[in-house]
């Protein structure tokens, strides 16, 4: 039998809570309804009203759509979500590949101002900035590069929080071998590996992330995917202690958080004002009940995925049964406070 054919079924007889609705309304701060999440033909790919109705039925009050981009693309994105304007909070971005153009600073300031006038409530940067886009010298652009300073300063001036995705799971930066905890996932998607010559290492990216937080204390950052390092909550805690401008979302990281339930529960208790609910989903997202089960119940050893064999690794998770007061903050109060 091949490892890929192995599909063990747990024999534990345990409570199986089904949490279709969250205890409080949810603001999902990490969703994609356009170019980066749905694809170039998103205008015809889903019906906005139907998608929103489905999300509302899952207890979602509002979402932050991170796919606002800029310029005409932003106009199109806003047109697509217009039928349910009140439901969508849109974040935009700027074209970092223009970094070496001589009017880059002016371009950044104008773009962010114009986008804000059109209605964006924050900025979003993808991991592309340090892992894909290259400057005029064909070099990857470190996220703490001085040329990008204008972005963080303009965001602070205009009171726009910046949601930023800097790295990926740490295993994506390690060799794809028999010790890699994401071996099967990386075999299916070899392009997701960043363990390549010439790319920044995970440690370098974390150093840049820290510099960003340190150098721009007036900018509010929401570091996506649990501060980039949910595998090491001790480290994330140290950053949160040091940098009051740092906040984190939990998008696509319950597979990490839920397999260290004691540490996670303490983490949520300690940083209850800095953690935001997010899923990394889009128009059709069936993962909400799993997130609710993780946050609300003390259920044990359940799947973090809707697939028969979970995609990220062959482990299960445990609920962290957060107190009502903490749940409320994580579900929507922290988002309401940070996003004006
Ligand atoms: Zn995302």
Image (tube, rainbow, N blue to C red):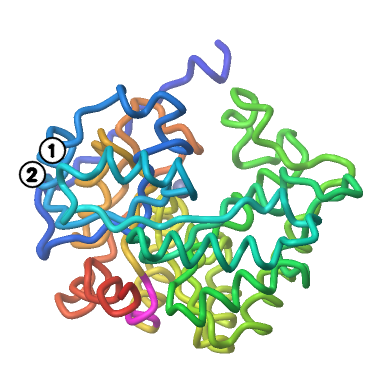
| Chain part drawn in magenta | 271-275
Q: Do the residues labelled 2 and 1 touch (CB within 8 Å)?
A: yes
Q: Residue at label 2?
A: 57
Q: Position of residue 167 (x, y in %)?
A: 63, 54
Quarter placement of the C terminus: bottom left
- 183 in relation to 86, above or below: above
- 186 in relation to 19, above or below: above
Residue found at the far top of this picture: 1
Q: Which residue occupies 36% across, 28% down?
A: 42
Q: Residue at label 1?
A: 54
Please tell me whether mark 2 sits on a helix, a strand or a loop: helix
Quarter placement of the N terminus: top right
Q: Which residue occupies 78% across, 63% down?
A: 204
Q: Which of 293 and 245 is in front in this view?
A: 245
Q: Which residue occupies 67% across, 43% down?
A: 172
Q: Where is residue 136 in the image (x, y as percent from the top left)?
A: 86, 48
Is residue 273 in the magenta section? yes
**In which quadrant of the rendered view does residue 232 lie?**
bottom right
Query: What kind of secondary structure does the magenta stretch mostly adopt?
Result: loop
Horizontal relation, residue 62 to residue 116: left or right: left
Horizontal relation, residue 127 to residue 114: left or right: right
Q: Residues within 10 Å of mark 2 (few under 14, many from 20)?
A: few
- 56 in relation to 328, above or below: above
Q: How many labels does the image show?
A: 2
Q: Position of residue 220 (x, y in %)?
A: 48, 78
Q: Which residue occupies 65% across, 35% down?
A: 192
């Amino acid at each position: 039998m091949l490892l890929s054919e192995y599909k063990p079924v747990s024999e534990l007889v345990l409570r199986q809570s089904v949490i279709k609705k969250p205890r409080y309304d949810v603001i999902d701060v990490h969703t994609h309804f356009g170019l980066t999440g749905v694809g170039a033909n998103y205008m015809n790919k889903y019906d906005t009203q139907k998608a929103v109705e489905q999300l509302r039925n899952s207890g979602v009050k509002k979402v932050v759509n991170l796919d606002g981009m800029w310029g005409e693309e932003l106009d199109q994105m806003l047109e697509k979500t217009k039928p349910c304007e009140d439901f969508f909070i849109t974040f935009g971005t700027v074209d970092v590949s223009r970094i070496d153009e001589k009017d880059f600073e002016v371009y950044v300031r104008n773009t962010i101002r114009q986008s804000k006038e059109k209605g964006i409530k924050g900025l979003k940067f993808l991991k592309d900035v340090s892992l894909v886009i290259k400057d005029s010298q064909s070099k990857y652009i470190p996220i703490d590069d001085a040329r990008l300073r204008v972005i963080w300063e303009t965001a602070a001036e205009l009171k726009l929080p910046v949601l930023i995705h800097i790295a990926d799971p740490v295993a994506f930066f390690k060799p794809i071998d028999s010790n890699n905890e994401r071996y099967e996932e990386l075999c299916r998607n070899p392009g997701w590996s960043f363990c390549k010559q010439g790319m920044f290492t995970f440690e370098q990216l974390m150093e840049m992330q820290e510099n960003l937080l340190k150098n721009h204390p007036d900018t509010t950052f929401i570091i996506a995917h649990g501060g980039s390092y949910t595998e090491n909550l001790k480290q994330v805690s140290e950053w949160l202690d040091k940098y009051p401008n740092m906040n984190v979302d939990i998008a696509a990281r319950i597979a990490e958080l839920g397999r260290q339930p004691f540490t996670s529960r303490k983490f949520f208790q300690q940083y209850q004002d800095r953690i935001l609910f997010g899923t990394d989903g889009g128009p059709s997202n069936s993962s909400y009940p799993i997130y609710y089960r993780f946050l609300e119940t003390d259920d044990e050893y359940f799947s973090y995925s809707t697939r028969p064999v979970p995609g990220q690794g062959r482990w299960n998770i445990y609920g962290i049964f957060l107190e009502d007061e903490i749940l409320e903050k994580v579900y929507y109060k922290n988002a309401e406070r940070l996003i004006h």
